[in-house]
Image: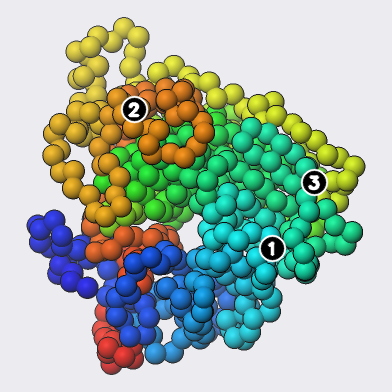
Amino acid sequence: MQMAAEGGGKELNEIKTQFNTREGVYKLLTHSEYSRPNRVPFNSQGSNPVKVSFVNVNDQSGNGDRICFNVGRELYFYIYKGVRKAADLSKPIDKRIYKGTQPTCHDFNHLTATADTVSLLVGFSAGQVQLIDPIKRETSKLFNEERLIDKSRVTCVKWVPGLERLFLVAHSSGNMYLYNVENTCGTTAPHYQLLKQGKNYSVHTCKSKSTRNPLLKWTVGEGALNEFAFSPDGKFLACVSQDGFLRVFNFDAVELHGTMKSYFGGLLCMCWSPDGKYIVAGGEDDLVTVWSFVDCRVIARGHGHKSWVSVVAFDHYTTSVEDADPMEFNGSDEDFQGLHFGRDRANSTQSRLSKRNSTDSRTVHTTYRFGSVGQDTQLCLWDLTEDILFPHLPLSRTRTHTNVMNATSPPAGGEVAGDIVNNVSNNPSTNDSGANTPSNSLSSPLPRSNSLPHSPAMTANNKSCAIASGVSKFATLSLHDRREQHQETDHKRNHSMGHISSKSSDKLNMLTKSRTDPAKTLGTPLCPRMEDLPLLEPLICKKIAHERLTVLIFLEDCIVTACQEGFIWTWARPGKVGLSSQKQAVSPSGTII
């Protein structure tokens, strides 16, 4: 790839190799690049997105990180050396080339991984799911082999947190299936009976004399189910669909907790904050949208991308908490007593960002950092700060901190999935989602930007002065104003509109397949208008590739990104560049010289 030396150059098509943030300089480690062994850019026309998965196998040598990635029909498994040493592409631990289908996604079981064995789930474009051990180079099982369960592409696969045998699979059909690795899939198509139903979702259990896969079938929204993720405590499941909706479920109780609608088009990606209080989603509206789990409402949008947002991720290592003692998630272990699958409650090691007692007089300051990558080949980093999260509280610190005085924890779950699966024959029910969904009502109007809160007596002139002194001018502009100031509207192939105004509701019907009338959701709590929300500006927005970006992962000492050409890059965090990685070079064959 042609890259600008040290991030220099002013041409629009130059690729940055470093960028600055308030914590320092992030640098691309060119010798830590992973790809196919021949290092030839992959012709990505018609191929599934390149995805990356990591696992640590607790190797006593201190080099326990392993990386898996798919490129076209190929799947690779390497030792990941990160910022420490240059990548040696000549020695993959495992390499697989598939015929007639392509890997689309994968996930490691972190509970069972050791230096001698690891369980890796791989989803495929034809609908199958394979369980392999890339260390032993074994294939243990193939699920949905005859495609009797679902014939559509697998879009996301993940192990259920805290469990060794259960995993969840999403398809482009809009269905999700819960599997047990110990069960067979049967020789005939499964028959289902209704377990629970709500607005735009239903859950069925498999009706069979003997236990078989799938244990549960979820039908969610309309169109493809693009991604899902479990909350940090493992109790809630969030998913985004092509109909433009984010839906959050209590996974054990199989109940809808809350929803959100994109500005237009489908939602493609989402992620949870480390404490489970916020969800960020991105998609075909070119925006990143921040949704509050506790309040069940949109609290901010961010505009920096010029095309579809393909991945969003929180940076657990830059997200910070100050002046607070470690606390734990609320809820008793009794909530998990009835789970017959051997599920353990998720360890609350991330709970420095969890519940704070609302009667506690201490002030806790937090900064949430998250990133996004898109089809515009750009990486954006964002800070979620106190003036956005709590716009009506006085700012006691700078923009880069968040006052979390009155935050509350996600409510505890009800019924557990194990009880539901085992007692389904005695408990068919059809609950409407509205009864179990927290209020979506909006509070008083939020500030237009990352600005100082408005007092009731503030005049128009005083408001503009406060905004100008509180934040940069860029953040205070509406998208309509910014569209007039920025004429750069060129888009790459398959890119959506880069600038949006509040008058774009006439375009909504063309950009979503949902039967829900988008014009009726715009301006409601499901989808507030642009002028009714704070507008985030990215801390940085850099072009880092020639092809669309498909991966963004935050690790302790680096950031990992990947593009559709099949290149996986490591960006060293400030002060984390290893001496060995600076001195070593790599030959075209992938060996260290």
Sequence order check, earlier mark of 2 and 1 = 1
Query: Which quarter of the figure is the C terminus placed in?
Result: bottom left
| Residue, disc 3 | 193
- Relative to 45, is 518 on the left or the right? right
Vertical position of residue 383 compared to residue 575: above or below: above
| Residue, disc 1 | 148
- Who's the residue at 46% across and 78% down the image? 74
User: To which quarter of the image does residue 203 belong?
Assistant: top right
Q: Are marks 1 and 3 in contact (CB under 8 Å)?
A: no
Which residue type carries mark 3? Gln
| Residue, disc 2 | 506
Q: How far from the left and from the top, in percent, is residue 69?
A: 46, 72
- Relative to 582, is 436 on the left or the right? right
Which residue type carries mark 1? Leu
Most extreme residue toward the top is 457
Q: How far from the left and from the top, in percent, is residue 163?
A: 71, 61
Vertical position of residue 60 compared to residue 344: above or below: below
Most extreme residue toward the left is 10
Sequence order check, earlier mark of 1 and 3 = 1
In whole angstroms, how far apart are the C-alphas of marks 3 and 2? 40 Å
> Could you tell me which secondary element the residue under label 2 belongs to?
helix
In whole angstroms, how far apart are the C-alphas of marks 1 and 3? 17 Å
User: To which quarter of the image does residue 6 belong?
Assistant: bottom left
Nearer the observer, 480 or 382: 480
